[in-house]
Amino acid sequence: MRAGWLGLAFGYAVTAAAANDGGPLRDLDWGAVPADNGIAYVPFDIGGSLDDRANVAALQVDGNLLIGGAATTTTGIDIGVARILPLHGVLDLGFGSGGRQLLGPSTSGGISDMAVMTDGKIAYATPLSMSSIAVGRLLADGTPDTAFDFDGRRALAATAFLPLGFILSTPKLVVQPDGKIIVFAGAGRNTPDVQQFAVATRLNTDGSTDMTFGGQGTGYGNYAPANGPSSIAQANAAVRLNNGQFFAGGVAFHTGGSGLDMMVFRLSANGELDTSYGVDGFGIIAFDQGGTLDDYLTALAVDSSGRAVVTGNITDINGQPRSAVARLTSSGQPDATFGVGGRVLYEVREGALWEYGNSVAVLPDGRVLVAGTSALCACGGQGDAGTLTMFASNGQINLFFGVNGTELFGTEFGPDPQILPVAQMFVSGDYAYLTGWAHNPVGTDNEDFASARVVVPLFRSGFETAEPAP
């Protein structure tokens, strides 16, 4: 069992005795399909395999949930977005066509990020090719907003982020109260030398580039820690603070590192690197457990004290991906009050082939929720359970949450109709929303956009200090 080395290496007992199931409470009324599993299914079912997969979600002011991803068609993959109503998670027929909207072909997984703007419009980002992405804006009802770059969508080549750039990673975005959109990614070039940077650019409300962003008059910023003659970095997540600053996180090689490490950096409201953060502007988190020693950051949140909390996966001693969570101080250093040296490794299920942390949220009291996927079987490379794990503010797993700290969306032993590999999770009010895809037990019997909703108050107070029942 791997929990032994995890516990020894990071200072707490992963294998503690089972606690009583303390939630979360699934909203079993969520979803129109009477499957009694609290999962809302959104089928597009256009053609091909009929499989549709959601990657992201966002909540509108009125409580409607937007879900974005990829819908399979007769000719390939289309960018798909749907809206479901807050009461029972059923499709909102006033959005798009029957609650769903297709936004054009996609070569790489559909919508990769989405955000609701202060005026109710919807910003989204999607890869177009290995060297280009698109950023679009919809009206609140799902109609493309033609005031944004004339047709509601602007294509951006790698050169919009990096001179001589030829490759772009999957884009992420954040929105400002004034309607401007900031896009983060990784961009690489191979001439005059091989370099890859975490990059960002800002778009005005009409879709044009804000040339003031980055502080160099170019409209973009390139960021990477020192790594000798070749910079290698990529941004995978970003958030905007109320003071206008941005936090971004991803991966990087850096001087003194043994492999790819998790990386966090902080930008001014104008996109300039805050060199007082971390070491020369970069907070580095290295787990270095084995295999390639590569550690990947996939999601980022910032707590009320300005501390970055991140999740992702690390390479274990057997070369397999394992879930991890870490916290940096507000100055960008590993937070010694969280886990061991700011880091926590954990295993959701004994014997899992691999596990990923895909999304993270910080509750007002400092507790941390991490959502992801886990696989006990090969399963064609797919997870056989979604996971939601609770950590106390000091990084210890909250054993009162779910079973031994985790709520599983799937069976203990393999695939079933309730599996929900969680691509994204966020907390709003009394609910945590988990979004991904799931095998729909009715209809065409295939994978569809899927979302679950769980009630937050059950695990907001009392569990961190209470003793387990005998």
Image (cartoon, rainbow, N blue to C red):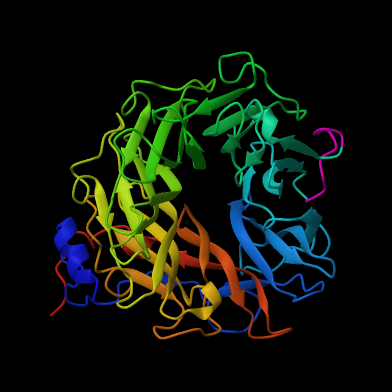
Q: Residue at x 29, y 28 (%)?
A: 331
Quick one: 8 or 302, which is closer to the camera? 8
Question: Where, by quadrant of the figure, is residue 119 drawn?
Answer: top right
In the rendered view, tell whether residue 14 sits above or below residue 184: below
**Image-based side of 6 in relation to 152, left or right:** left
**Image-based side of 205 in relation to 16, left or right:** right
Question: Where, by quadrant of the figure, is residue 463 drawn?
Answer: bottom left
**Image-based side of 390 in relation to 425, left or right:** left
First to last magenta residue range? 142-150
Image coords of residue 208 (percent x, y): 75, 26
**Image-based side of 134 in relation to 449, left or right:** right
Q: Quadrant of the C terminus?
A: bottom left
Give the main secondary structure, helix, strand or loop, of the magenta stretch.
Answer: loop
In the rendered view, tell whether residue 263 sits above or below residue 50: above
Q: In which quarter of the image is the N terminus?
A: bottom left
In the rendered view, tell whether residue 180 sits above or below residue 56: above
Q: Can residue 238 be seen in this view?
A: no
Image coords of residue 14 (percent x, y): 21, 68
Q: Can residue 122 be seen in this view?
A: yes
Image coords of residue 32 (percent x, y): 66, 76
Quick one: 426 or 151, which is closer to the camera? 151
Quick one: 302 or 279, which is closer to the camera? 279
Image coords of residue 98 (percent x, y): 81, 65
Residue 440 inside the magenta-drawn segment? no
